[in-house]
Amino acid sequence: MKSFNIQNRRYLGNKFKLLKSIKELVAKKCGNYSTFIDLFSGTNVIANSFNSNKVKIISNDLLYSNYVIAKSFLEITKSPNGLVKKIESLNSIKTDKENYFSKNFGNKYFTKDNAIKIGAIREKIEKISTNSNEKFILITSLIYAADRIANTVGHYDAYRENLDTRGKLELQVPNIDYSKNKNNRVYCMDSNILANEIKGDVVYIDPPYNSRQYSDAYHLLENLASWKKPDVFGKAKKMDRSHIKSKYCSKDAAEELKDLITKLNTKHIIFSYNNTGDSKDGRSNAKISFNQIKNILMKKGKTEINQIKFKAFTTGKSKTENHKEILFYCRVK
Ligand SMILES: C[S@@+](CC[C@H](N)C(=O)[O-])C[C@H]1O[C@@H](n2cnc3c(N)ncnc32)[C@H](O)[C@@H]1O
């Protein structure tokens, strides 16, 4: 059966291309560390790359869909019995009966057939999962499979008018290294609340940069993962997302960051900042300025700035010629 890796999904602002630079910086600056915290973990490609028997990973993200994936890749210590058989049985489902998912998202984000199948599989996962770990992994497999054939440019703020994504849905097995996960902890919380409850050696901080809420961009995956079948609204068929709005996308972003950094109990802070330049619609403009970040970090400890050239995954509207990715490093006092 085919398999997939944690990075095989599309996600705005994911740092897969920055992995090498972050690893180099941590190796150079942080010496021996036994806990690595990824506080805005998104796809978890960064947390996953630091996962080893010697390092405890703490991963956190506000979105439940990211939490489900993080649970699967980073916290579960044993492959569920008969996993491949279950995935095969989900792939073999044949139905043309409409369901919650196909009614709302069929002929929009997916072909009708694919949407019917996604909804039917999600429903079946509720029935066949014998424990929560198995359920997390089956939902993870479904999220990646659905995202591979979605009629979008990589997020669900809108679907493409031409429904020409005609690939067939195929669930695959996630490549999880269960042997490394024993000490890890995965959370789905507001980072500013979690910061009161955890401590560690290194924290990697990669919050949203602008007013684009991740809950808007990934509402569909969130809906699929949590499967509470809420009413959806508007052309983009979004559910109510008030519980997953981030203050980092608001005018209070800088205050929020200040509060977070004050609370953090770690020895090293790595902070990702990217400068995409200002765009026409304003939604892509940064909510926290370079100087604000620098000043906040300098109060916490000696801070260095590393600039990395990096081609971003953007929605296509922002200017990327002068795109710079910056890694702040702060040695906490
Ligand atoms: C730039 S993305 C992180 C990308 C990630 N480093 C990666 O490589 O995939 C920012 C993430 O922060 C999450 N987020 C936003 N506000 C948050 C908050 N207050 N607490 C925790 N996570 C939050 C979003 O859901 C999003 O996944």
Image (tube, rainbow, N blue to C red):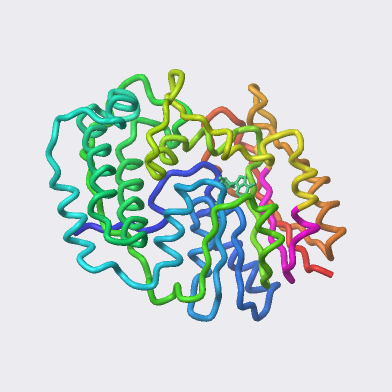
Residue 153, percent from left and from top = 42, 32
* Quarter in which the N terminus is drawn: bottom left
Left or right: where does residue 65 sit relative to residue 132?
right
Residue under the point 45% across and 47% down: 65
Based on the displayed image, in which of its 4 quarters is residue 321 positioned?
top right
Q: How many marks?
A: 0
Looking at the image, residue 325 lies above or below residue 153: below
Residue under the point 55% across and 76% down: 55
Residue 211, percent from left and from top = 65, 32
* Quarter in which the C terminus is drawn: bottom right
Region in magenta: 260-274
Looking at the image, residue 44 lies above or below residue 63: below
Left or right: where does residue 298 sit relative to residue 283?
right
* Residue 128 located within the stretch drawn in magenta: no
Residue 238, percent from left and from top = 46, 27
Residue under the point 26% across and 32% down: 115
Pick the front one: 190 or 128: 128
Residue 96, percent from left and from top = 14, 30
Residue under the point 28% across and 43% down: 122
Left or right: where does residue 27 sit relative to residue 254?
left
Magenta stretch: helix, strand or loop mostly: strand
Pick the front one: 315 or 211: 211
* Residue 262 located within the stretch drawn in magenta: yes
